[in-house]
Amino acid sequence: MAEVDLRGVSKGYKDTTAVDDLSLHIKDREFVALLGPSGCGKTTTLRMLAGFIRPDSGQILIDGRDVTDVPPERRPTAMVFQSYALWPHMTVADNIAFGLRLRRLPKSEVDDRTARMLEVVGLPGVMRRYPSQLSGGQQQRVALARALVLGPKILLLDEPLSNLDAKLRVRMRDEIRRIQQELQITTVYVTHDQEEALTMADRIAVMNKGILQQVGDALDIYDRPATAFVADFIGSSNLLSGTLRLGGTSAVAQVGEARVPVEADGLPDGAAVTVSARPEDMEVLRAPAPDAFRLEDPRLVNFGAYKRLLGRHPAFGQLEARVPKAFALGKEPVYLRFTRARAFTSDEGDRS
Amino acid sequence: MAAQVPALPAIRLTWWIDDPRIRRMLLRLFAAALAVFIGIPLLTLVLWSFAGEWFWPNLIPSQWSLRWWQEVLENPRVTNAMFLSFTIAPVVTLLTALVAIPAGYAFARLDVPFRRTLLLLFLIPNAFPRIGLYVSLAVLYYQIGLIDTYWGIVFLHMIGTMVYMTWITTATFRSIDPHLEEAARDAGASPLRAFFSVVLPLAMPGIIVASLFSFLASVDEAQGTLIVGTPHYITMPVLLYTLISSFQRPVAAVFSVLLALPSLLLLIVAQRYLHSEYVAAGLGRV
Ligand SMILES: Nc1ncnc2c1ncn2[C@@H]1O[C@H](COP(=O)(O)OP(=O)(O)OP(=O)(O)O)[C@@H](O)[C@H]1O
Ligand SMILES: [Mg+2]
């Protein structure tokens, strides 16, 4: 059992609010990713969980126990630092055994657990090396082993893969997820890489400017974004600003001279809205049709597995649609239609 | 769209630093200059101290002798002074370290208010002619009974050593990634434990260099020691100053070699320590 409860946690610095009234419940054995752009308060949140930063207000509970004022050495958390923070004057074995020795375990047990943990992270046979004699990926594994060897209830990782090359990053991603599943450990993983968050986490908490925007699984935040920020940050979206017009069963957004049918749960008539539509929710037509409009200056960008159709519209501005890789442009005009667009209040858009 | 303006190539006046050949050459030049300016006078001293007979223009003495060494080492004033110097220096170094290490750590890590001002304040004793400071210190010592005492000399030496020991340790602690300390806390170490297990070992090279300087500065200090230590507490350099005119040149040479010896020994020790594996590892990561 290891649950985490953040209750209205805030932390400000001189001129910024790093984390603003954040509440988040993390279930036992859950893998939660904290996702957001640089400076949104992810690290601050994680460091408050670890005990390095004391929140200005709010509470942090682990398994129902209030740990807000408990120092890091007495919290059941273990952290993997972005820079790994391996101790350069100790061998790999000593790095991992440090915490065990502090607990005055018998030498045989210390050696046992150290060796076992190096096997778990797939790194036997480097015990006597110094951290500087390891590659980045190996250092990463040692840092993970050092955190896990103490059997923490909660594992905290701060952008652990950001110093690795792209190939290795994908491999370590799977590896960390595998270890997390194997050890059944509650995990909070900070990243600004949405692919990492979407592929690794059970649930994703999207943050912006210190404010928690949405918590949900990959499908939730991709398909049902709660704010315009999430819609824009996760994947890519065409964003338009306009005014909501409700009429009977349908809702449209008035964007300049044009109108876009939208989903607008609970928003009032006349509200200022940000409309978001995914490139894959744009239908590409070769002939005029109801609700379709002509795309000016169409051009194609090849992404290998698919292509992106880019262009302009007098009211909507720049637009993009996802098309199959066989798609080609001819002389004849191209038309677009929004098959699914969502409206968010622009207030929230500003707040985020 | 405006026409693209071709970017000017950035010009750095220090381009030659990047050229490894030039860098190597400069290093060699520097080493050679060091050897000439430090090595040759030292060597001359050593030769003089063993010279039986040495007339110009011979490059080396025409006769060798241990007589000067014998003369100096059999003189009780000399042995007393040596004994005093080498009992003062370690105490000065130790006391300085005891104050400067925590102070350096505080300056580096904690939000000490007016940190810059405080660090500058430390420099003040070095910003003015020392002699004035020593005279006023002597006046104070008369009043509180520290004049012509062992501890009076120790405190006087500490005025100088405190400055750079604090500066060096501050820089050293600041160069250590705070995450290393946090990682220790995270693994269950108390703040004190994290300091002794992680921060202190990593700061050791800096601390050793600073201690070395303190030790040598104490062994070398003559001006202030002369003012507050006479007549009973005569250290080596004070003796050298007071007697240099009345001794023959080879005797002065023996003295000087004796004074230089601890520096050489300490440098050799420090050099071995500074080459140990983890320091290289630590530096490699920065
Ligand atoms: N010690 C500090 N003093 C002042 N401001 C700080 C401090 N630490 C963080 N901040 C500010 O708080 C905000 C959140 O910082 P935080 O490090 O949590 O962001 P982050 O989401 O981890 O960003 P990144 O992805 O760049 O690591 C930023 O605006 C940052 O400038
Ligand atoms: Mg961060």
Image: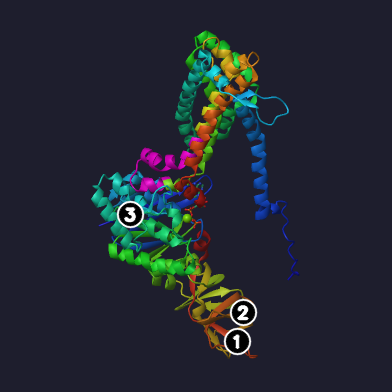
User: Which secondary structure is most common in the magenta stretch?
Assistant: helix
Q: Which mark is residue A5?
A: 3
In the image, residue B81 sits, relative to residue A333, either above or below, namely above
Q: Is mark 3 within 8 Å of ligand 1?
A: no
Q: Amino acid at mark 1?
A: Val
Q: Which mark is residue A20?
A: none
- The foreground one among B197 and A175 is B197
How far, Cα to Cα, is label 2 from label 3?
Answer: 46 Å
Q: Which mark is residue A311?
A: 2
Q: Residue at x 51, y 16 (%)?
A: B74
Q: Position of residue A135 (x, y in %)?
A: 45, 60
Q: Is residue B37 left or right of residue B68?
A: right
Q: Is residue B188 magenta?
A: yes
Q: Is residue B243 magenta?
A: no
Magenta stretch bounds: B181-209
Q: Residue at x 42, y 45 (%)?
A: B181
- The foreground one among A83 and B73 is B73
Q: What kind of colouring is applied to the model shown?
A: rainbow
Q: Amino acid at mark 3?
A: Asp
Q: Secondary structure at mark 1?
A: strand
Q: Amino acid at mark 2?
A: Gly
